[in-house]
Image: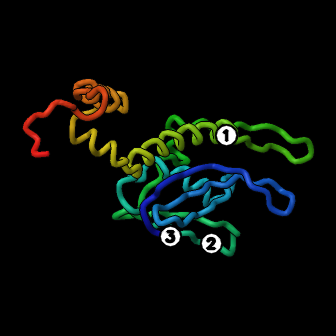
Amino acid sequence: MEGMIAKIEMTEREYQGKTYNTINIEFTDGEVLQLNRKGYAGGDFLYYMENIDLSKPVYIVLSYEEETKKQNLFIKQGGWLKKKYTKDYQGSKPAWEPYEVPGEGIKYSRIKEFEFFDAVMKEINEELNAMHSKPTMDEKIDAAMGMQTVQDRHDREEKAFAEEPIMQGGLPTEDDDLPF
């Protein structure tokens, strides 16, 4: 997929009675790429996400390794992006927490990592909203007139109304210079 990213969100959806956590990457043209958050491609995206320049289009490539049954994700933006987080560099991202499952051995919990990425995603979406929101006509007029808020516009209209002369009793009755 290729285009400008408009929104990134994590959602839960059900499929055949099982709940899946997905990463939805919405593009400005309305296309949506859905990734399993716990899958390899979803994890790859989370690790790339902070290195994406949101003001430029991205090219997202998915590949599948038949031998390992693993789907990978790569992002191109000018050149191929590098992941922010790697095996050698974890940065501020929380580590996976080991726990033991009797009869199965050691497993790893990614709950704190997902909470971390939820917060990162929220910041990214705030930036995307600011980039892609279009001002209303009133906001454009206010900006051109140096107004900052709806209250400023209201105050301006109230002042203009108060300065208008008020005619009492309808039309003037005295004959002035009118031709009729």
The residues bearing labels 3 and 2 have C-alpha atoms spaced at a distance of 15 Å
Q: Amino acid at mark 1?
A: Trp
The residues bearing labels 3 and 1 have C-alpha atoms spaced at a distance of 30 Å
Q: Which residue is mark 2?
A: 64
Q: Quadrant of residue 107?
A: top right
CB under 8 Å between discs 3 and 1 = no
Residue 15 x, y percent position in the rendering: 80, 61
Crowding at mark 2 (Cα within 10 Å: few <14, some 14-19, many 20+)? few
Residue 144 x, y percent position in the rendering: 21, 42
Q: Which residue is mark 3?
A: 1
Find numbered disc 3 in the image and state the secondary structure of the residue it sits on.
loop
The residue mark sitting in front, 3 or 2, is: 3
- Left or right placement of residue 59 versus residue 17 in this view: left
Find numbered disc 2 in the image and state the secondary structure of the residue it sits on.
strand
Q: Residue at x 70, y 39 (%)?
A: 111
* Residue 174 image label: none
In front here: 17 or 154?
A: 154
CB under 8 Å between discs 3 and 2 = no
Crowding at mark 1 (Cα within 10 Å: few <14, some 14-19, many 20+)? some
Q: Amino acid at mark 2?
A: Tyr
* Residue 96 image label: 1
Q: Residue at x 83, y 56 (%)?
A: 18
Q: Is residue 151 visible?
A: yes
Q: Which quadrant of the figure contains the C terminus? A: top left
